[in-house]
Amino acid sequence: MAKIFVTRKIPEVGILNLEKAGHTVVVSEKDGVLEREELVSVLKENNPDAVLCLLTDKIDGEIFAAAPQAKIFASYSVGFGHMDLDAAEEHGVTLTNTPGVLTDTVAEHTIAMMLSITSRITEGDRFMRDGKYEGWGPMMLLGTDLKGKTLGILGAGRIGSRVAEIAKKGLGMSIMYYDIKESDFLNSELDAEFRKEIEDVLTESDVISVHVPLLDSTRGLINMERLSSMKNSAYLINSSRGPIIDENALVMALKNKVIKGAALDVYEKEPALASGLIELENVVITPHIASATEETRGKMSDMAAKNIIAFLNGETPPNAVEKK
Ligand code: GLV
């Protein structure tokens, strides 16, 4: 029987599974993110055998040292940019994530964001609530059609591929994509065009959707130069990780009409937003909720728990994060 520390309240299915497997579960009592010193001290105090952490926890050598018994940190997230893979290796810690279960949910949210910005849904909603609606107008809040337009996918993993599939089959868009390798699914099922150079996708697409993971090589991938290479009529969507886009550059680009609009679910320094972002009309912003459905969050909780249970049973957890 092991002691598991959970850094924040999560859907109870995973907690119940851990308890059913005979483990003791301690869930952080704080309503919100534990500050770094709080996390260190609560880990020292509990000395857990495993930790179930979240993407809001920065997991690195100091954290591993504070919980020396815990040789597994299972994150309740698909992204793992918040965990230091080198430090984990040094401390002999296995890291896991929750891939797959949130693919459809994040893809659906991404499509919702794309439609919201191109059909001006949130802008129209604000307009109504502000009491500005005085009747139908032939030139009022004109949006942009998507059928026949090109969606550029940056990162053709699970989520990027599903977004491409919905856009192609549901909206009649053409797909172009950039990745380090070609995707058979995108090429053969969606008739997508692969581009070796990210610039080609940026210059040729009408909408760009970001799906690369946050790595040293993808931090700041979309900078001012790359934003400037996009069409003035293009939109940028990001449901991956904030630091992939230089957010100050994006604000400038949106202000100066370098691109037409953006829809973001993630932010470079979240929860803080780049100065000026919130004042812009041509941006849709959601609070990092792309995977936030009841069904999916339950599956993520279950999956994180299963990774811990397998590890504590001496098995290789199903979703160990590999250092590439
Ligand atoms: C959400 O952003 C996740 O990584 O699960």
Image (spheres, rainbow, N blue to C red):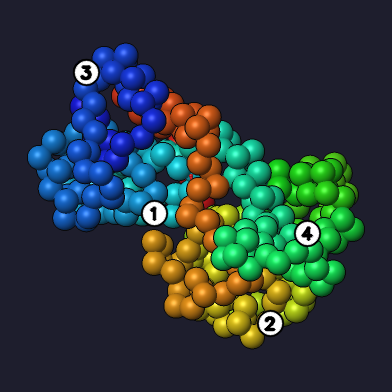
164 w.r.t. 217: above or below: above
- Check disc 2 and report the residue beneath it: 258
- Helix, strand or loop at label 4? It is strand
CB within 8 Å, label 2 to label 3: no
Q: Label 2: state its secondary structure.
A: loop
Nearest the camera: 34 or 51? Answer: 34
Could you classify mark 2 by the number of other residues whose Cα lies within 10 Å: few (under 14), some (14-19), or many (20 or more)? many
* Left or right: 133 in relation to 315: right
In whole angstroms, how far apart are the C-alphas of marks 3 and 1? Answer: 28 Å
Q: Mark 1–mark 2 contact, CB under 8 Å?
A: no
Q: Nearer the viewer, mark 4 or mark 1?
A: 4
Residue 105, numbered circle: none
Three-letter code, disc 3: Met
Name the residue nearer the viewer: 9 or 280: 280
Q: Amino acid at mark 2?
A: Val
- Quarter of image, res 53: top left
Q: Is residue 54 left or right of residue 258?
A: left
Front residue of 294 and 50:
294
Query: Which residue in the protein does label 1 denote?
Result: 82
Where in the figure is residue 191, as x and y percent of width and height? 88, 49
| Mark 1 residue type | His
Q: Which residue is mark 4?
A: 151
Q: Residue at x 52, y 56 (%)?
A: 286
Q: Residues within 10 Å of mark 1 (few under 14, many from 20)?
A: some
In the rendered structure, find residue 1 and report the number of the disc placed on it. Answer: 3
Determine whether 125 is above or below 52 in the image.
Answer: below
Q: Write the residue at 22% across / 55% down.
A: 35
- Whole-Å distance between the Cαs marked 4 and 1? 29 Å
**Residue under the point 64% across and 85% down:** 256
- Three-letter amino acid code of the residue under disc 4: Leu
